[in-house]
Amino acid sequence: MVKKVNYGKILAVVFITVLIWVWADLAVDETLSVSKVNITVAKFTNPNLWVSFGGESSASIDKIVLKGPASKITDVKRKLNDGSLVLEFFLDPEQTEAVSSPGEHTLNVTTFLRQSDQIKKLGLTVESCKPETLSVNVVRLAKKLLTIKCIDETQNVIKVATIEPKQLDAFVPEDWSGEKLAANVQLNRREIDQARLSAVEKTPFIELAPRQIRELQRPVKITMPPGEDLLADYTITTARLRFSLSPNIQGKYKVVVDNLDEVMRTITIRATADAKQAYEKMPCQVILEIDDEDAGSTEPLRKELIYNFPHEYLRRDEIRLNQQPVIARFKLIPLPPAETPTGTGK
């Protein structure tokens, strides 16, 4: 006689077996060490406070030891390895009682991370951290009136820019005064060109500390005069001269400049601040170009110097000579032919 299969018992056995495996997984905890994790100050809404880790916006945790069920540890390890999980934590002073008031505070890193939503969602806990504590500085800011300055990408002030409004209120450290009470609005090359045609809207910012930037709460409008008005008079006092000889006469003549003092004297230009700076950084400021037809003459030759302006700024008409070009007087003296090594023969 065929026995009736008791499916209820089979299901009960399977269910109990699964429970045993789940219980076994939960009962056996494993640990995982994660290195170089950052805690960053969140961009919170309270403008009255400046929170930092010793002036920095973030702090690095050398090592975090996570603990939890083996399956969850395996899952987190896999996600960390394939890049689908990045452990990054944010310190919100308004939600962290230990650092909610002005002053210097000590943050218990382990306690802070255990309360993190990210750790809780992973189903893990934080067993230990290195370092165990971090110093958190909270500075109360005061509202003060700041003058807005316009700068370019090299941090030079664009004095001819018109800014509207010229001043704005902002929260800054209470001890700021005098020239410190200023905010910057930065324009790149494209924006400078645009500002010559119509107003460019940008948000000013202050630098509370190196790499600690905070934007003001409203933008300003910047306009620029036509390109010519951006040029100023400059004097280049350290000019470098280069001879440019055609390939046919290179190494065959010595160049002697009779009026070298005049050739090397100061150069006056009209340029933008950027163009002037770029010109000074060129390998040479003036070039004396010597052609084949100049060779062989024993009489002083005369040639106008070439002013080696940077092509980028020259093309945009942001640099030009503001004097008469200097005429170089020079002669070419033949050099003795180089000795040709003789072979040893056979």
Image (spheres, rainbow, N blue to C red):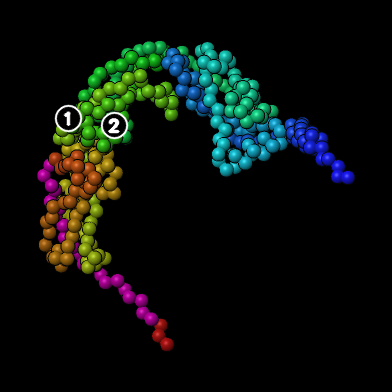
Query: Which x, y percent locates residue 301?
Result: 12, 59
Image quarter of the N terminus: top right
Q: Please tell me the numbered disc located at residue 98.
A: none
Residue to which mark 2 is pinned? 187
Residue that appears at 57% across and 14% down? 97
Mark 1, secondary structure of its residue = loop
Q: Position of residue 319 (x, y in %)?
A: 19, 41
**Which residue is tagged 1?**
225
Q: What amino acid is at disc 2?
A: Leu
Q: In this view of the protein, which residue sits in the foreground, 165 or 287?
A: 165
Hey, which quadrant is residue 253 in on the image? bottom left
Res. 131 in view? no
Stretch in magenta: 323-343
Q: Position of residue 270 (x, y in %)?
A: 17, 38
Q: Earlier in the sequence, mark 2 or mark 1?
A: 2
Residue beneath the point at 57% across and 36% down? 85
Q: Is residue 189 visible?
A: yes
Q: Please tell me in which quadrant of the rendered image residue 169 appears.
A: top left
